[in-house]
């Protein structure tokens, strides 16, 4: 049977020449007679199935020979069903190899050059390429480079008559799955295909594992972010409760903490503060008077002027608040605002007498916001003043009590902006700040 296939292959190769001299019907009859004569006089060759013709040596292969070699049956089945592309510039070699692989149960297509191979790959589904190394035009290595660039998952076997290890190493380095030496044998070819498909299967498994791992990491990241969001919301609820306690303690300044927090957030937004700075400032402003919870009512709620001794007790609320809040890890930065919110630019403030840039930026911003709200809110000893008076006071004390840069930001905004900030729903914006969400949009809306 193999001989007949070889004769047919040779017929395909020589027919264009013979048909010019011999009628097709006579030529077909002669071919059949030759096959019958060969079968009659050389039965031993057919029984062994060994053929050595045109530099190709191969043996008939049975399923038993594969089972004895320990080949994985699944991969072997895949190799047997593979759609092959044979690329060789010698017609006889292409045809013989095509007959050989078709007898092994595989479908194949043949082309004489790398250019035609690349064109066919664009049009037809191919599982594996078997290419000759030495071809005119684009060589086998050139075809290999193009295949790896455009079809990275395609199996590629390099075949050559040169038994040179260096060429094999070069082909493997450039992406060949195996390197076959002519004359080819069907069992070697099948094992090469099996190894190549096994390699591709392993690569696909690794890629699938990587993708699965990435999905798992993304899922865990989302879960972690959700958990952190719940923690942040718990922080916000805690701060809301503390702020409500401060307002209940000092009913005369109810809402002051919310308003001054919003004023400070607006100023920091105008100064392009980071989300972390906004978060810290919002929490510090919201809790700046928490130390007043420890101040006696007789001093805290006194309608008249305080004595010098009472003033010292009142001033101590910043240290009390700092000590209360500073022990809470997520409020450690905000505690600095609580401690420094009565410091003055010229060093005349308390409790540490900090001066200029020694005062944290967030505390300098808070000082302006606190003064604006204090002047524009009702107090037991006076009614609220207009924003124009607060503007005049900030301008007059810039560089003395207040940071000139922060004062300039406040003065650059019209009064209606600050009136709108005062009237907005403060609870929503404070919760956003506690959760670390940028407030740029909410700041711009006013």
Image (tube, rainbow, N blue to C red):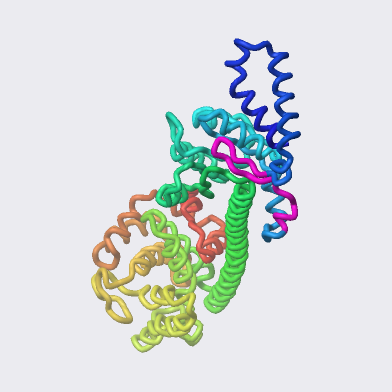
Q: From the viewer's perspective, is 299 left or right of 24? A: left
How many numbered circles are shown?
0
Closer to us: 243 or 383: 243
Closer to us: 136 or 25: 25
Determine the residue positioned at 47% across, 80% down.
325
Q: Position of residue 230 (x, y in %)?
A: 61, 68
Q: Report whether residue 52 is seen.
A: yes
Closer to us: 359 or 74: 74
- Image quarter where the N terminus lies is top right
Q: Is residue 276 magenta?
A: no
- Is 222 located above or below residue 90 in the figure? below
Residue 285 sits in quarter? bottom left
Q: Report whether residue 384 is seen.
A: no
- Is 176 located above or below residue 421 in the figure? above
Q: Position of residue 404 (x, y in %)?
A: 27, 60
Q: Which residues are magenta?
A: 50-67
Q: Position of residue 87 (x, y in %)?
A: 54, 34
Determine the residue positioned at 40% across, 80% down.
318
Q: Position of residue 73 (x, y in %)?
A: 72, 55
Residue 341 sits in quarter? bottom left
Residue 229 sits in quarter? bottom right
Question: What is the residue that sits farthest to the bottom in this orientation?
Answer: 309
Closer to us: 42 or 172: 42
- Is 347 located above or below residue 313 in the figure? above
């Amino acid at each position: 049977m193999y001989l007949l296939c070889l004769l047919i292959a040779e017929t395909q190769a020589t027919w264009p020449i013979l048909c010019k001299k011999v009628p097709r019907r006579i030529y077909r009859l002669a071919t059949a007679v030759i096959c019958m004569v060969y079968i009659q006089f050389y039965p031993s060759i057919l029984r062994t199935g060994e053929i050595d013709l045109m530099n190709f040596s191969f043996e008939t292969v049975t399923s038993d020979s594969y089972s004895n070699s320990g080949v994985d049956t699944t991969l072997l089945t895949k190799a047997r069903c593979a759609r092959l592309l044979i690329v060789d510039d010698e017609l006889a070699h292409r045809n013989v190899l095509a007959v050989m692989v078709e007898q092994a149960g595989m479908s194949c297509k043949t082309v004489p050059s790398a250019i035609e191979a690349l064109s066919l790959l664009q049009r037809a589904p191919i599982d594996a390429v078997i290419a000759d190394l030495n071809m005119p035009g684009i060589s086998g290595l050139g075809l290999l480079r193009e295949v790896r660039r455009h079809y990275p998952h395609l199996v590629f076997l390099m075949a050559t008559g040169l038994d040179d290890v260096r060429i094999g190493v070069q082909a493997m380095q450039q992406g060949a799955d195996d390197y076959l030496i002519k004359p080819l044998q069907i069992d070697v070819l099948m094992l090469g295909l099996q190894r190549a498909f096994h390699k591709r299967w392993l690569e696909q498994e690794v890629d699938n594992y990587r993708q699965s791992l990435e999905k798992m990491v993304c899922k865990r990241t989302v879960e972690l972010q959700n958990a952190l969001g719940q923690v942040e919301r718990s922080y916000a609820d805690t701060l809301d409760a503390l702020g409500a306690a401060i307002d209940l303690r000092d009913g005369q300044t109810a809402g002051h903490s919310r308003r001054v927090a919003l004023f400070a957030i607006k100023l920091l937004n105008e100064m392009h503060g980071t989300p972390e700075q906004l978060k810290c400032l919002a929490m510090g402003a919201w809790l700046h008077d928490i130390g007043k919870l420890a101040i006696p009512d007789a001093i805290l709620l006194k309608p008249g002027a305080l004595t010098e001794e009472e003033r010292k007790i009142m001033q101590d609320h910043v240290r009390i608040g700092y000590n209360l809040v500073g022990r809470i890890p997520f409020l450690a930065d905000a505690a600095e605002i609580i401690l420094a919110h009565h410091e003055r630019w010229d060093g005349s403030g308390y409790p540490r007498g900090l001066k200029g840039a020694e005062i944290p930026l967030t505390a300098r911003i808070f000082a302006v916001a606190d003064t604006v709200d204090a002047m524009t809110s009702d107090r037991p000893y006076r009614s609220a003043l207009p924003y124009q008076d607060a503007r005049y006071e900030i301008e007059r004390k810039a560089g003395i009590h207040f940071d000139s840069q922060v004062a300039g930001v406040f003065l650059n905004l019209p009064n209606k902006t600050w009136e709108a900030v005062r009237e907005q729903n403060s609870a929503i914006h404070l919760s956003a700040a506690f959760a670390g969400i940028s407030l740029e949009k909410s700041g711009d809306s006013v």
